[in-house]
Amino acid sequence: MREDVPDQSAINRQYMRYTAQISSSSTVSQYVGRALQVATSDPKGPVYLWARREVMEEEVSQPLKPLEFQRWPAIEPNGLSPTAALHIASALLTSKYPLIITSFLGRNLNAVPALIALSTLLSIPVVSTCPSAVNFPFSHPFFAGVSFLAPGAHTPHLPAADTILIIDCDLPWIPANNAPSPDARVFVLDGGDPLKTTTSTGFWHVSAEMMCRADAERALEQIIEVVKRGDERGRNLDDPAISKDVVTRGRSLKVRHEEMVRELNEAEAAYPEVHSESDVPGATITVPNILGVLRKVIQHATSSHGHALRTLFLNESISNYQTAWMHLRPEVSGSVISSGGSSLGWALAAAVGAHIGGEIKEKKEGRGYDLIVAIVGDGSYMFGVPSSAYWMAQKYKTPFLTIILNNGGWKSPKLSMLGVHPDGHGSRATGEKLTVGFGPDCPDYAQIAVASSAGWAWGKRVGVAGTADSGKEGLNRVIEQGVKIVLEERRCAVVDCVIQSI
């Protein structure tokens, strides 16, 4: 193994916003300032600095000059041009079936109220595609759901939309799976990289009438101002035809939202019927069952009654991403986050870091987190190196709850195969036959956490047919116990939920 890699930064460069080699101790502060300036400017992202051993051990004759952060400011966010704001507002104002699509607008907490205001003003449905943040409150009647763009999984509003506003979104749809009308007017707004020149590899394109580099918060406020004032032809919400469309559309969206909530409630209440011990292990609970119980237990157990800003969910459920986002029913941005990157194994270490960050926030602002919950698949749990993660959690006393959605393997590779060959031989094969299964004897994931933390963490498996901890009663009992251990005993708890095997 070589200790001095000739081009160390090349290993990380493709994942970074900025990389640099510190060549002298006299330039350390300048490089740090430059790196922070790039990291905090849109599109925000990680930076990487490195130095050779000789530089790191260089003797400094004079104290290094402290970095003056105010001299290295991030780029100020910019808004739309007056022409663009007028053009987009006019299109939305006169649209019969408008639609807003976003992925990460909620990273800016101040942008969410502006999005809510525009949606409410014009009765526009909002859908989150592949979200990494909470962009819109679940309970809002114009929330149209979440999609991870599988065939047929996009909002039914997409093919009917005649005007689409894409704002802070890397992938609004996959044309081969779901596509808008070719006659739809499409507008793309992004605060950092609307053409995805730094955040996308390979080919990227959205057929659009207009593409703008503009901060979401400022752009939405500009569009709202024009809508209220009126477009270049004097059309505004006082126009009888426009007003009628807005009211009619709003009523229809409320009915659809109520239907969506009813379907989620039914899925959470419907437990599989187990007729004999010969049934497939894990058939006693489903992902909606698990998340419905988890949400309700947290609401009753936490001092803030599950208040969005006091409970943090880290969603790395992978093949269950969409189901998890929908059944968690998040209301406030910052309450649920997913990794914006492509690699797995993020959630466990992120939970440790989030706990430490919450403690710092509590000291500064008087409020941190009551509870941090990592929701992972069994595959992403293994990628998270639990033997290290729970030792680290024990070392730094950062308790969190882990919910493992254990389907017996890596389902996502199987889904990728089915997306290309839906009727091939692999479509009829088990996960074990496809070499993506972990069975028949899967690891005892919960006990990995217990062992690696020297008994500090607590863990239990639930959902296996024929055991005491199966079905509705077992699920409620084990999740209640897990939440209690984190909240009262301040230890990590791992609930291994065995669901239908791949």
Image (cartoon, grey):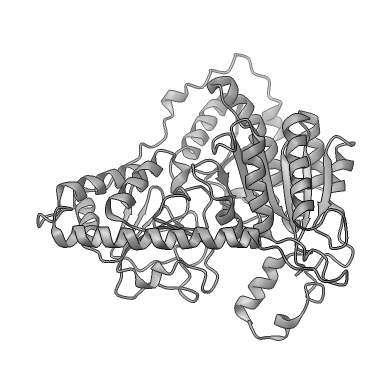
Observer-nearest residue: 133 or 286? Answer: 286
- Residue at the spot 33% in from the left edge and 57% down from the top edge: 124
Residue in front for this viewpoint, 119 or 226: 119
The residue sitting at the top extreme is 62
Residue 455, image x and y in percent?
89, 37
User: Which residue lies most toward the left here?
Assistant: 233
Q: Which one is in front, 232 or 480?
A: 480
Q: Is residue 140 left or right of residue 187?
A: right
Residue 290 position (above or below residue 45): below
Q: Nearer the viewer, residue 305 or 314?
A: 305
Instruction: List x then y, in percent, for residue 217.
Output: 35, 43
Point out the residue furthest to the bottom here.
Answer: 424
Residue 400 visible? The answer is yes
Tell me the quarter of the picture where residue 483 sits. top right
Q: Split into 4 quadrants, where in the image is the C terminus? A: bottom right
In this orientation, does residue 2 appear?
A: no
Q: Position of residue 182 (x, y in %)?
A: 33, 76
x then y, percent, for residue 388 = 81, 42
Left or right: 465, with 92 as reference point: right
Q: Is residue 181 left or right of residue 201?
A: left
Q: Which residue lies at the image location 88% right of the left edge and 58% below the top edge?
A: 467
Work out whether 127 lies above or below 449: below
